[in-house]
Image: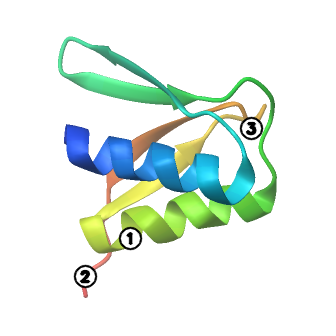
Amino acid sequence: MILNLDEIINLKNQLAETFGITLHLHDACGSQSFSFDMPVSEEIQNFISDYLKPLGGTAQFSQSGTRFIVQKSTLDN
């Protein structure tokens, strides 16, 4: 799933204001991934998941907790 620029900017701003962290976007050839400078807490991971849910997406975090991709939710609402 690809987020549009408004959705990315909004998420970046909310993370900066709420947690004081910077979200980095990596965009290439029709795919996106996101990263942080350090591993993020479960609270931040849940915040991101809650942000993506109404957009129809879910976050898949790396084991290190420093990266994630957004996948289209497979849950039927």
Amino acid beneath label 2 = Asp
Q: CA distance from mark 3 to mark 1?
A: 19 Å
**Mark 1 or mark 3, which is nearer the start of the sequence?**
1
| Residue depth check, mark 3 versus mark 2: number of the one nearer the observer | 3
Q: Which image quarter is the C terminus in?
A: bottom left
**Could you tell me residue 44's position as x and y percent?**
70, 57
Q: Of 32 and 7, which appears nearest the observer?
A: 7
- Name the mark on residue 10: none
**Mark 1 or mark 2, which is nearer the start of the sequence?**
1
Mark 1 crowd level (few <14, some 14–19, many ≥20, 10 Å Cα):
few
| Residue depth check, mark 2 versus mark 1: number of the one nearer the observer | 1
- Name the mark on residue 53: 1
Badge 3 marks a residue whose secondary structure is loop
Does residue 55 sit above or below 15 in this rendering?
Answer: below
**Mark 2 or mark 3, which is nearer the start of the sequence?**
3
**Left or right: 31 in relation to 69:** left
Q: Which residue is mark 2?
A: 76
Amino acid beneath label 3 = Gly
**Could you tell me residue 36's position as x and y percent?**
66, 29
Q: Which image quarter is the N terminus in?
A: top left
Q: Which residue is mark 3?
A: 65
Mark 3 crowd level (few <14, some 14–19, many ≥20, 10 Å Cα):
some
